[in-house]
Amino acid sequence: MTEQQSLFNYCLRLGDDALVQSYRLSEWCSSAPILEEDLALTNFALDMIGRAQALLSYAGTIEGKGRTDDDLAYKRGERQFYNHLITELPNGDFAFTIARILFISAFEYSYYNALQHSSDATLAAIAAKTIKEIKYHLSHASEWAIRLGNGTDESHGRLQRAINSLWMYTGELFEADEVEASLAKVNICPDAPQLRTNWKHQVESVLNEATVTIPKDEYMQTGSRLGIHTEYLGHILSEMQYLQRAYPEATW
Amino acid sequence: MVKSTHSKDEVLEILSVIPDPEIPVVSIREMGMLRDVLITDEGYEVILTPTYTGCPAMGIIEQDIKMTLDSKHVFPVKVKLVFDPAWTTDWMSSVAKRKLREYGIAPPVHSSCNLGVFEYNIIQCPQCNSSDTVLLSRFGSTACKSLYKCNSCKEPFEYFKCH
Ligand SMILES: [Zn+2]
């Protein structure tokens, strides 16, 4: 891969992470346990759709074939999507959604903090904007995790089950294949494996306060950065891309 | 290329009337979203920065800019969205903050974005200036606001979050 191809692929990864998270969060619209949570989760979805737009537009610019953010969102198949597996899992219950936001936002908080210093000016600017939003996601999810863990036996049990089933999807966040290794070498992207220690401290301090048990590091799922996904991504895309597939080039 | 002969200051002046679509008492210039106007051989380029990455008002603002300039015979116009440097509530003018307060929205506390993940500011009630207020919801009607309640005058109010 040339550096241009690597950068294109990398922007798709970050853009797809934001796009698919946004999709899942949007599914909470009108279904959250309380009105304030409905607002919070859909606000997060909005942050992430904005981030996805910025990153996918930039990917299109890097590629130089005239593809827009919409082209990239609506006209790629499942195997050309590179979002982390953890982002595409169904929402589950509220505890599951909160645990997922906690794991991802704690990761993104370190990751985008580092990306602000990218040698790529566009990525650095997008990161500087995004980090402020991620801070809100992280504090909100942390507070909810602590509340659920210290709530009733029911809420505690649900949070524990969510943590247990999500854990094997967290390893992937800290992988770096040759694409990212080559970009890290020229300071375009952060060195993800290095961020895991910090992430674990952050997550542990929240989960300890929430009185839930932290799972052991055993088998970790992987594959998304090669376009290999769980069964769930295909279902997301069939709905998200329906209009463009049924009526190609339709516009408002 | 045919273009009109307005100066940068004239163009900025014309654009000063455009309100923030979500908070119409303040203009996009007072909000700090209108960054610059460049005049090139190609025409006028208006440099705009979004408050939030997902701000749904950006499309409307872009249209407002084009329509407003068109009505004043400023042409041709391009609007460019930039992310660098990232918009911060610290760019809001003091006039904008006063207008927000008068409108019933507590303005952002200066430089409060540098707080840690779990730190909070004390927010003054825009109605009675009491500091005895409580956060109801971190997220409100738009991405940029939180919901508060004043314990003194019992009024609920919105706070423009620091960013
Ligand atoms: Zn009051």
Image (spheres, rainbow, N blue to C red):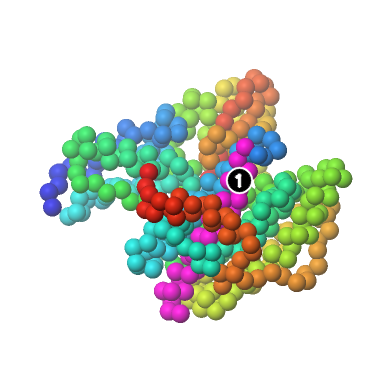
Q: Residue at x 84, y 58 (%)?
A: A213
Q: Toward the viewer: B130 or A33?
A: A33
The image position of residue A75, as x and y in percent, is 44, 60
Residue projecting furthest to the left:
B2
Q: State the predominant SS element of the stretch in magenta.
A: helix
Q: Please report the residue visible at 52 percent of the width from the left and 76 percent of the height from the top.
A: A179
Question: In the drawing, does residue A121 fall left or right of residue A145?
Answer: left
| Mark 1 lies on residue | A27
- Most extreme residue toward the right, as rendered? A153
Relative to B107, is B1 on the left or the right?
A: left
Horizontally, is A118 left or right of A150 in the view? left
Q: Nearer the viewer, residue A20 or A144?
A: A20
Element class at badge 1: loop
Q: Is residue B101 above or below residue B50?
A: above
The residue drawn where x is 41% and y is 34% is: B21
Asked if residue A159 lies left or right of residue B140, the reply is: right
User: Which portion, as a residue range, is magenta?
Assistant: A1-30
Q: Is residue A115 above or below residue A37?
A: below
Label 1: few (<14), some or many (≥20) within 10 Å? some
Whether residue B15 appears in this view of the structure is yes
Which quadrant of the figure has residue B4? top left
**Residue at screen point 28% across, 41% down:** B66
Q: Disc 1 residue type? A: Glu
Residue A15 drawn at (x, y percent): 50, 60
Q: Chain of mark 1?
A: A
Question: How many discs appear?
Answer: 1
| Residue at the extreme top | B153
Residue A184 in percent (x, y) is at: 53, 74
Task: Report which quarter residue A61 is drawn in.
Answer: bottom left
